[in-house]
Structure formats: structure tokens, C-alpha cells
């Protein structure tokens, strides 16, 4: 009797299996769309890693070799929504290109073709000069490592998404294609000047610009501009919320910068929240304190206090204290982690350092590294033999801005070093040998956040001020001439913001 | 007649020189800095040959390779003039290598004597001497294939330069899960990062009773580190009455013609998956 039941089950099952077999199997074909030519087209790809994130946030990564230009990234369950990102790496595992799909994908029994714009993880640096680019897929010595984008003097640049940048110059916003760094569409009049920061509404082509004239919301496709607030003047902006609950622009007003030189932490800040799509709602006071930077993700808003070295959640969520980092000055969110740049004080015989910390957005898995001590060499001007030099250690070294490259293989930083050196006297005669001096150095730094190794430094600007030098035996000193990969190709500048394509900021 | 004899002699000498000089079996650091320079004795044959050597070395070794263009950036525009002055002399070339911080110089020389003569010298910067040298004679207009360039370099450099490794760091959300990499058991989680020959592709399987096995395929690049974060989730529907064939039997027995119901009940089983493929354009 039992055998007969089993047999019947098998017969029915076989029928069902064959019935299933007649249905379309479906599939997902990813078309990784690279720039067609030029230096911005990624090269040297050896492997492709496809990150598949399930609805519960768990990501599985399938890494496979590129077979010619094709690849096979395994399979996914039917009818379970996923998000996709791709990383192309060379044969030294260096990230050479990145792309992602912001929309959720539902695998079904149809054949879906999804085109993903894939780009090099280019770093964009804004200053009083033209927008500079760093291409981390090249070695620092390669002439293609540094570049510039034309007609962008005194602009700030922010990636909109993988395909375009927003470059704000004066009162206008110009889109720039990431495939060729050429302008796209017409310039948009923001009607405000003095842009200092911008943030994109997640998943959309709208950005909020913080400027001297207030907060403005820009739809980069339609050119529509709407003022969210005209005063008080925001210094930083971050976007929180979701499409379901609505988005909020958080404005940091009265930014308290990390202490430089012999200064002290002064000033007070406040964070106001503005509903983006409910213009009649009044702004909400989110927090007050001494904040240098803010970031937001979903319903969480984070603030960095450089005076007490804390990074906290400014909303009601937990945990309240995310990390303690001395001089916490800059924040970025990449993937599911909050990144923090702070400082480590100078020690005997070595200069101050930059500290890079990160923690998951839920407050778990804290990690941090400290970069190498900072010093700068000053040389005596009339030393034809290049024998007289001073290695000045940094009294303070603070982060100005932070960007995290996709996948967090590198972090990119703007740093500022300040150092004061008292005059040196001949102990036997009492005569002044070397004058008192102050040094201020701005660097662009590319570092590995896992090891703290600095992979590249560009000395953006070095200013040495000599005090009461006339009666010194060796009176005239200058910053050593930056050479090779440390030299900025477009000349010295004071960088203000830094961002990375597809990265966190 | 004399020209033919001379040419034959040159070719013979050149072919002999492939094995004439050198101790390629020495075992210097596999990540030492090597600068590749190009010297031409009035010949424009084999354009880009030094770049091909750079490319081959970058792909096949872990050496820190500095090509001619990069060297020019470090050394300065006078590099080409210095190369001409050196005229292939090892001590002089070693000075160039020293100035750019290299441990070795590979000088790719191209000259013409009827045929095109391609030479490669490996110069040790510290001892200022030639540690290996190869030469080959190529017909006019011909160029060595990639395989030939690889063969030259394998003669020029020690075999240890071509042994490369990568690291796979497997981190699972569970301890006590059995890890198999490339068909070989690697113990139970947590395990230390695995140093494995690269480039190579490895199948990874992580199994623990009561959990859905985790499998993936990883292409390990040389000198690369790939982190595999395995999330093993508990099996769903483990009770006997939840299995599909029992449900099918119940359908047959209870509803008679319950096939359609069973079909819909089973269509969300883990076996219902779709493939992801892709192309780079």
C-alpha cells in the first residue's frame, strides 16, 4: 500500500516537474556601460564582482573572471527583490571601475536587460582654481593621475549620480558628464551665490545646495529651482528620510571648525531640518552644539563635534554615541558605514596625524586607523647645495573634507597642517640663527582605511610665514619645492571640498 | 657572400646569447622595483616593445615596474639623453636605476643588422653588473608574439618572480562551519586568511548542518586579497510535513487533482532561481 502511494506521488511529481520545465526560465543580463573612449574609460579589468543585496540588507558578492568582455555572476532567487552593484578590478585587485543600480530589481521569469553606467572612481577636488580630478586607477607618478575639468574656476563639484556631476560656479549649476567631463544641457540659475556644500536626494536627480543665500532645491533635469530657506546661512547640508516617509534636508548652521594651530574651539552650531516636499512645514530644530559636519541616512542624522571629539546621532535613534574621535571634523557615509576623519595630537619627535574611523550605521563594528605623522620640509633659499633644511612637524593636522571611494578601498581627504617654530639662537653668542616661522600646508591625501597607508599625497598649497627674520643669520626659508607625484599639476590651490564618483561624502 | 656570412654569424651569436649570460635562478625579492628602459641604435623597428615588456611583467609578476614614461617623470626629460650616453654600459645604466630607486634595470635594446636584433639586459643596480642577458634575431618587419615576449622574460628573470599568490579571507557569520576551497577542506570557521596560488579561480563552499550551504566562485588575482563574507541562514521549512513531496502526496490524497495547488506551493522553493550574466561594453 505504502509503495503504491509513493508511486502515485512520484507520477504526479514528475508531471509537475515537466510542467514547470515548459515555463520560461528568465534571467538577468547586466550591460556594464563604460565610456566609449578616452582616459575615462576603465582599462585593465580582470575580474567583475557583482554585489547582490537582498531585502534584509544581506549582500552576497559573486566574483568571477572576465571571459573576454562577458561574465557569469551566478543566480538569484525568483521573486525576491534585490539591489545590484558591480566592481571591476585589475589583476592587482585594484578597483578600476564601479557601477550600481539604485532601483530595486525583481527577478522573474522574463529576460531582463539592465544597463549599468560603470565609471572609474574619479575623485573631484574643488578649490579657487579649476575643479581637479584624481584618477586612483593610475599610479601617482602617471601623468594621467591628476587632471582638471575646463571652465570650472572657483567652482564646487558634486557627483549627482554615476553619470553626471553638478558643478556650481557663482549662481549657476552646470551638469558635467562623467564619461567625458563635457557639459550636459543648459546651465541652471540657482539665484544664490556662495555655494559651500550640496547633497543629493537618494535615488533622485534632485540636489539641495547650501549657499550664502540659503538652501535651494534643484531638479537637474527640469532646471526647476526652489528655495527651501533664505536664512540663516547653511554651511553643510545632508539629506535624510525615504521616498515613503518623505525627505528632509538637514542644514548645519554655524559650523565649528576643528582647532588649528594654537587656536581654541569656539562658536556654536545648530542643525535645522527642512521638509523637502512639504514647503509649508516649518523647519525643525534638530540639535545644537559645536558641530563641524553632519551626515544623514534614512531616519538617522549624525553630527561630528571636534571640540569634545564625539560623533553622535542627533535624532532620537540609538546608539546615541557612535564613536569618540579627537577633533572629529568630517563625516561620510558609504554603504552601511559611517566614516569619520579626526586628528591625533602630536607627540614628542613626531607631528600630528589624521585618524580615520568607521562604524556601521547601527553602531556596531567600530574600526579606526591612524595615518603617518605629518611634517613638511622647509629649505634655506640660498643653499645651492640643498643641504640646509628643516623638517617641521605638524602642531595640528585637521581634516577639511572627507570622501570614501566606492567599496571603501580608499578614502580621500583634504587636510590642513599648522605649525609654529620658535626662532633658534646661537647659544654662545645669543645671535639669531633661524627666524621664527609659521607654516600652513594643505594636502590632498589618498589613504587605505584598512591599514592607514597613505597611497598618495599631493601638496596642494604650502605657505611659510617668516617672523622678524631680518636679524637672523639664515633669514630666508621656503617650503621645499613639491616634486613628482606630490606636485599639483594645475598649480597651488586651497582645496575646500572633495568627492568621489559613486563614493560616500 | 660576406654579408650573408656576417649575418649568419650575428644570428648564431645572438641565438647563443639567449643562454650565454646570466644567473636567472637567483632569488631576489619578488616585489623589488624594476625599471624598464628602451635603447635604440638607430632603429625604429619593434615600436612599443618596452611597453609590451612592462605590460607582460605587470601581469605576470609582483615586481614594482616602472616603465619608460614613468621613469621619465621621475628622472626628468634628460632620461633619453642619459640613455644615449650610457650606450648600453651596465655601470652607467645602474646609475639611472639608482636615481629612480630601482633594484634592477631591464634595458630593452633594438638594433638592426639586416635582421632586427632585440636584446634584453637585466642589470643589478647595486653591483652595477649585468646579471642576465638575452638576444634574438627577428626578420625585418616581424615582431615577437606575446608568448615570445613571455619566454624572453622567463629566461631573463628568476622563476620565483613568476610565482604569485593572493589571499582569500573567509569570514562567516557562524563558527564551526566546514570550509572547502577548490575542493580541498580548509577546516572549520573561523579560519585564518588563506594564501593561495594566483591568478586562479576557486570554488568555495561553506557548510553547516541545519543551514543553507554557502557557495561561491572567486577569481583570485595575484597580490590581491578577496574577502568572502559568508552569511549562512537557517534552512526554512525543515519539518517533514513541509517538504514538497509530502505536500504533493497530501494534495493527491486529499484533493485528488491537487497538482495545480502543489505547483504553486512549490514554485517558491530555493531551486527556482534565475541566472545573472553580463557583458562589458
Image (cartoon, rainbow, N blue to C red):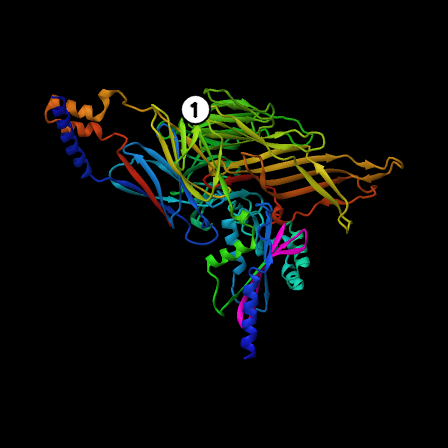
Q: Nearer the viewer, residue B175 or A487?
A: B175
Q: Nearer the viewer, residue A449 or A471?
A: A449
Q: Is residue A129 magenta?
A: no
Q: Nearer the viewer, residue A298 or A231?
A: A298
Q: Is residue A193 visible?
A: no
Q: Quadrant of residue B214?
A: top left
Dot 1 lies on which element?
loop
* Outermost residue, right side: A429
Q: Is residue A343 left or right of residue A159?
A: right
Q: Which residue: 80% across, 43% down?
A: A475
Vertical placement of A274 versus A131: above or below?
above
Chain on which label 1 sits:
B
Q: Quadrant of residue B123?
A: bottom right
In percent of width and height, residue B202 lies at 41, 39
In percent of width and height, residue A321 lies at 52, 21
In percent of width and height, residue A86 lies at 40, 40
Vertical placement of B233 versus B62: above or below?
above
Q: Quadrant of residue A290?
A: top right
Q: Main secondary structure of the magenta part?
A: strand
How many labels, in total? Answer: 1
Residues in magenta, as a range: B103-132
In percent of width and height, residue A427 lies at 86, 35
Q: Is residue A455 visible?
A: yes
Q: Which residue: 52% across, 60% down?
A: B49
Q: Nearer the viewer, residue A164 or A387?
A: A387
Residue at numbered disc 1: B175
Amino acid at each position: 500500500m505504502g509503495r503504491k502511494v509513493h508511486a502515485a506521488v512520484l507520477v504526479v511529481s514528475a508531471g509537475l516537474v515537466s510542467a514547470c520545465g515548459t515555463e520560461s526560465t528568465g534571467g538577468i543580463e547586466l550591460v556594464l556601460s563604460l565610456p566609449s573612449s578616452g582616459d575615462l574609460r576603465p582599462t585593465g579589468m580582470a575580474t567583475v564582482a557583482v554585489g547582490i543585496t537582498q531585502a534584509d540588507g544581506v549582500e552576497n558578492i559573486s566574483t568571477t573572471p572576465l571571459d573576454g568582455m562577458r561574465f557569469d555572476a551566478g543566480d538569484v532567487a525568483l521573486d525576491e527583490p534585490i539591489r545590484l552593484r558591480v566592481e571591476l578590478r585589475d589583476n592587482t585587485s585594484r578597483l578600476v571601475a564601479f557601477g550600481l543600480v539604485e532601483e530595486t530589481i525583481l527577478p522573474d521569469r522574463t529576460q531582463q536587460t539592465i544597463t549599468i553606467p560603470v565609471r572609474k572612481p574619479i575623485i573631484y577636488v574643488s578649490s579657487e582654481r579649476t575643479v581637479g580630478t584624481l584618477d586612483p586607477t593610475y599610479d601617482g607618478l602617471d601623468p594621467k593621475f591628476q587632471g582638471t575639468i575646463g571652465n570650472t574656476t572657483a567652482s564646487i563639484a558634486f557627483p549627482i549620480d554615476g553619470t553626471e556631476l553638478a558643478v556650481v560656479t557663482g549662481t549657476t549649476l552646470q551638469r558635467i558628464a562623467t564619461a567625458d567631463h563635457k557639459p550636459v544641457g543648459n546651465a541652471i540659475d540657482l539665484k544664490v551665490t556662495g555655494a559651500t556644500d550640496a547633497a543629493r536626494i537618494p535615488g533622485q536627480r534632485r540636489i539641495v545646495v547650501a549657499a550664502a543665500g540659503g538652501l535651494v532645491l534643484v531638479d537637474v533635469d527640469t532646471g526647476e529651482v526652489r528655495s527651501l530657506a533664505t536664512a540663516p546661512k547653511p554651511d553643510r547640508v545632508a539629506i535624510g528620510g525615504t521616498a515613503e516617509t518623505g525627505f528632509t534636508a538637514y542644514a548645519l548652521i554655524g559650523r565649528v571648525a576643528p582647532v588649528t594651530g594654537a587656536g581654541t574651539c569656539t562658536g556654536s552650531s545648530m542643525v535645522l531640518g527642512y521638509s523637502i516636499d512639504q514647503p509649508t512645514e516649518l523647519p525643525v530644530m534638530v540639535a545644537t552644539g559645536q558641530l563641524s559636519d553632519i551626515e544623514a541616512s534614512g531616519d538617522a542624522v549624525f553630527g561630528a563635534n571636534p571640540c569634545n571629539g564625539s560623533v553622535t546621532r542627533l535624532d532620537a535613534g540609538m546608539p546615541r554615541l557612535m564613536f569618540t574621535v579627537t577633533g572629529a571634523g568630517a563625516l561620510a557615509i558609504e554603504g552601511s558605514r559611517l566614516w569619520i576623519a579626526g586628528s591625533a595630537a602630536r607627540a614628542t619627535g613626531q607631528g600630528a596625524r589624521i585618524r580615520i574611523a568607521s562604524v556601521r550605521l547601527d553602531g556596531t563594528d567600530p574600526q579606526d586607523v591612524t595615518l603617518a605623522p605629518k611634517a613638511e620640509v622647509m629649505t634655506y633659499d640660498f643653499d645651492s647645495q640643498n643641504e640646509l633644511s628643516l623638517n617641521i612637524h605638524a602642531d595640528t593636522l585637521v581634516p577639511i573634507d572627507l570622501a570614501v571611494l566606492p567599496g571603501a578601498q580608499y578614502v580621500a581627504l583634504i587636510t590642513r597642517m599648522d605649525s609654529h617654530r620658535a626662532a633658534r639662537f646661537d647659544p654662545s653668542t645669543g645671535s639669531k640663527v633661524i627666524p621664527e616661522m609659521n607654516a600652513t600646508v594643505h594636502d590632498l591625501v589618498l589613504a587605505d582605511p584598512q591599514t592607514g597607508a597613505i597611497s598618495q599625497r599631493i601638496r596642494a598649497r604650502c605657505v611659510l610665514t617668516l617672523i622678524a627674520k631680518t636679524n637672523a643669520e639664515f633669514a630666508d626659508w621656503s617650503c621645499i619645492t613639491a616634486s613628482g607625484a606630490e606636485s599639483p599639476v594645475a598649480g597651488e590651490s586651497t582645496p575646500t571640498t572633495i568627492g568621489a564618483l559613486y563614493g560616500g561624502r | 657572400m660576406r654579408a650573408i656570412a656576417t649575418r649568419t654569424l650575428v644570428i648564431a651569436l645572438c641565438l647563443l646569447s639567449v643562454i650565454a649570460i646570466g644567473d636567472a635562478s637567483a632569488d631576489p625579492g619578488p616585489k623589488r622595483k624594476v625599471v624598464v628602459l628602451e635603447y635604440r641604435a638607430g632603429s625604429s623597428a619593434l615600436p612599443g616593445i618596452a611597453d609590451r615588456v612592462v605590460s607582460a611583467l605587470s601581469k605576470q609578476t609582483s615586481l614594482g615596474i616602472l616603465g619608460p614614461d614613468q621613469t621619465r617623470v621621475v628622472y626628468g626629460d634628460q632620461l633619453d639623453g642619459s640613455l644615449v650616453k650610457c650606450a648600453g654600459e651596465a655601470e652607467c645604466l645602474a646609475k639611472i636605476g639608482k636615481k629612480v630607486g630601482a633594484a634592477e634595470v631591464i634595458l630593452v635594446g633594438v638594433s638592426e643588422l639586416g635582421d632586427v636584433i632585440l636584446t634584453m639586459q637585466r642589470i643589478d643596480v647595486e653591483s652595477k653588473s649585468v646579471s642576465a642577458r638575452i638576444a634574438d634575431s627577428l626578420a625585418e618587419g616581424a615582431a615577437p608574439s606575446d608568448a615570445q615576449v613571455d619566454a624572453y622574460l622567463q629566461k631573463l628573470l628568476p622563476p620565483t618572480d613568476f610565482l604569485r599568490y593572493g589571499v582569500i579571507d573567509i569570514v562567516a557569520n557562524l563558527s564551526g562551519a566546514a570550509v572547502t576551497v577548490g575542493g580541498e577542506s580548509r577546516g572549520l570557521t573561523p579560519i585564518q586568511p588563506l594564501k593561495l596560488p594566483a591568478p586562479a579561480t576557486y570554488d568555495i563552499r561553506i557548510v553547516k548542518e541545519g543551514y543553507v550551504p554557502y557557495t561561491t566562485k572567486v577569481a583570485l588575482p595575484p597580490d590581491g586579497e578577496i574577502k568572502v563574507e559568508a552569511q549562512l541562514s537557517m534552512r526554512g521549512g525543515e519539518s517533514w510535513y513541509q517538504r514538497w513531496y509530502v505536500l504533493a502526496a497530501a494534495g493527491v490524497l486529499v484533493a485528488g487533482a491537487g497538482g495545480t495547488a502543489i505547483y504553486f506551493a512549490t514554485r517558491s522553493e530555493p531551486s527556482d532561481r534565475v541566472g545573472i550574466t553580463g557583458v562589458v561594453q
